[in-house]
Amino acid sequence: MQIVDITKKNIDSIPRACGSMLPAKEREAAREVKKEWIKTLLNQGFKMKIAVDDEGYFMGMIEYLPIKISLQRVSGNNIIYIDCVWVLNQHKNKGIGRALLEECLKDTKDFDGVATWATDHVIMNKGFFEHFGFEKVDGDKTVCIMFKKNKPGAEPPKLLKPKFKFNMEKGLLNVDLFYNPCCPYSFGVAQKAKKMTLDSKKKIKINEHYLSSKDIIEEHGLSVGVFIDGKDCTVDFLMSKSLDEILLLY
């Protein structure tokens, strides 16, 4: 196994699987948006490392950047934030995730600490990060924010509280979709939710929100998600209920 840093020269090596739930055309469009976003941040501390096998085939990745420019709903100072770490199913339990995270931790020793989001599910599993000394410092019903201090007295990050004011029209099912260029998968969640709500044959108003900068994230207190009549019904990303079940309630 080899761990490779993504640069402008090899940016076409970024994984395609993130948007795998999208049709091919939309998947490639989301990936191109991600590539352009990465290019703007490579000189601002953004890093992506990919694990490849001896033949150069992708096995897993980790992506991290200063929390000040992360498109996640967190705030903090002098902290590196891990947006994502994952390994292809066929390569799990081979120490690849460990190797990628250890690369990140070695790379970020000069910062006050390293933070990430985590869930109780397979994606960004909380137990994985706890094994490396991360502790929960904030969170809500769907996600927890974890932090590993590098320096005594380091101030932990905080989860931004939702502040978005939903504009709901009476007599309609108001669906708000939030996604960003950091996560191709969030495009998939938004598009899947859009199709399912339209297929439900209910009277619907769909609002799409593309959150392309930290300023917008901080203004809304949101990063990705599916909201119905102002209620958080995010599915497939943080895996609460299926959207089918939720739509039956409306």
Image (cartoon, rainbow, N blue to C red):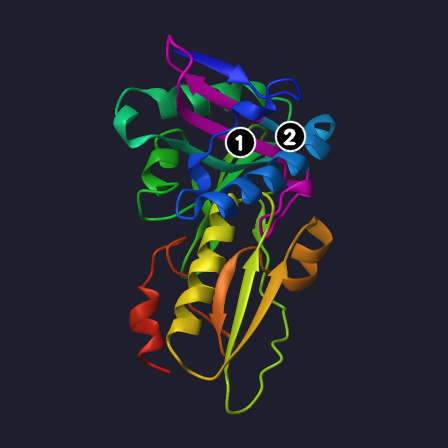
Q: Is residue 5 above or below residue 154?
A: above
Q: Tell me which residue sits at (47%, 55%) in the image.
A: 139
Q: Tell me which residue sits at (47%, 84%) in the image.
A: 203
Query: Would residue 56 be counted in the magenta stretch?
Result: yes
Question: Which stretch is magenta?
Answer: 48-77
Q: CA distance from mark 2 to mark 1?
A: 8 Å
Q: In terms of secondary structure, where does tag 2 sit?
A: loop
Residue farthest top in this picture:
54
Residue on which the image places disc 1: 63
Q: Looking at this view, is 89 or 238 the one in front?
A: 89
Residue 213, image x, y percentages:
70, 49
Residue 208, image x, y percentages:
59, 65
Question: Picture quarter containing residue 37?
Answer: top right
Q: Taking the image as drawn, is residue 154 in sight?
A: no
- Amino acid carrying label 2: it is Phe
Query: Would residue 72 be counted in the magenta stretch?
Result: yes
Q: Mark 1 and mark 2 in contact (Cβ < 8 Å)?
A: yes
Whether residue 66 sits left or right of residue 226 in the image: it is: right
Q: Tell me which residue sits at (64%, 22%) in the image.
A: 110
Q: Tell me which residue sits at (42%, 72%) in the image.
A: 197
- Amino acid carrying label 1: it is Glu
Residue 140, image x, y percentages:
45, 60
Q: Which mark is residue 46?
A: 2
Q: In terms of secondary structure, where does tag 1 sit?
A: strand
